[in-house]
Amino acid sequence: MQSEVMVRTVSGVVLGVLVLALTWFGSLAFQILSIVIMALLFFEWFRIVGLKDFGNIVWIIGAVTMAATGLCILAGMASYGVGVVAVGAGLTATVRLASRRDLWPAFGLIYAGFFGVAFAELRNSGGGYGFALLIFIFAIIWSTDIFAFFGGRHFGGPKLAPSISPKKTWSGFVSGLMGGILAGVVAAVMLTQANLIWIVGLAALLSVAGQLGDLFESSLKRRFGVKDSGNIIPGHGGVMDRMDSITFAAFTAYLVGVALPGSAFVSGGIDNGIALQLLGP
């Protein structure tokens, strides 16, 4: 048990340092990180839902979709990846419906592809604010996880979603929310000049989104009888197991940034406004 904890701790620290370093460098390094995570999410999702035949037409459509989306990200036009993902998911849904099968593979393309687009756009938008925004999100999600774990263990009480994740409690949810808000405020104050009231609201929204992402992945694995999404990260499982909360938080931040006044789609992608819309002074 002690050795397992040590492996988990070391791999977690190494992974965290690597992600932070690539986030700092940005540009091509971060684009590659976004593409690698996107590809692994795609692979693990298909593994979970039982699609293991690489020659299957759905696998081929998915692989082509991920490759095309990756090229959009590398070309600095990540927002066009939304359209690519939509087409790929639509084709996948058509094939699955024609054979009277479920649509989980199509949902997987949306999950993985939209994450790759959102993650890349969040970092590369708004000049220097892209880095601050990602650190803001990391601080919220990592603190939410830590506070939820210890808050749930200390306070106990009613279960949050016993049919999905029996160990999670409402006290853990609230503790995670408070911890996420606190961490988000600290990160924003240190890195930006954003309005404090706005930051509190945004941090709360992203913390809740992250916890919903965790529950969503637990529900997916429970539905298909899978314990871990993979085994690529020693002591942790798969990439989905570690990125579930950040995935939903990235989705949410991206959508909020696009929805805010002033953020517009232009040739070449979103007009570098997401980070400034969310964290600008």
Image (cartoon, helix red, strand yellow):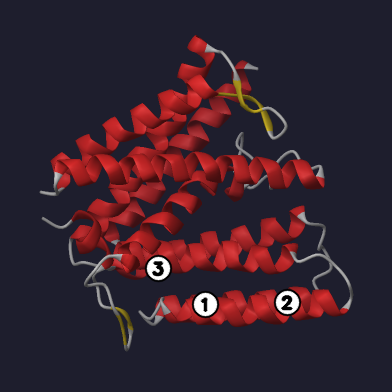
**Is residue 159 or residue 228 the one in the foreground?**
159
Quarter holding the N terminus is top right
Q: Nearer the viewer, mark 3 or mark 1?
A: 1
Cβ atoms under marks 2 and 1 closer than 8 Å:
no
Q: Which residue in the structure is indicated by mark 1? A: 69
Q: Quadrant of residue 223?
A: top right
Q: Which residue in the structure is indicated by mark 3? A: 31
At numbered mark 3, what does the secondary structure look like: helix, strand or loop?
helix
**Is residue 169 or residue 138 the one in the foreground?**
169
Residue appearing at x 18%, y 67% in the figure: 127
Q: Is residue 32 left or right of residue 193?
A: right
Q: Is residue 156 visible?
A: yes
Q: Is residue 149 visible?
A: no
Which residue is most to the top? 154
Q: Is residue 236 left or right of residue 177?
A: right
Cβ atoms under marks 2 and 3 closer than 8 Å:
no
Residue type at tag 2 = Thr
Please provide percent x and percent y for residue 6: 54, 24
Q: Going from the N terminus, do you reach mark 2 or mark 3 first?
A: 3
Residue appearing at x 43%, y 35% in the figure: 13
Q: Quadrant of residue 188?
A: top left
Q: Is residue 61 left or right of residue 246?
A: right
Residue type at tag 1 = Thr
For residue 94, above or below residue 212: below
Please provide percent x and percent y for residue 136: 29, 46
Cα–Cα gap, marks 3 and 1: 11 Å
Res 92 label: 2
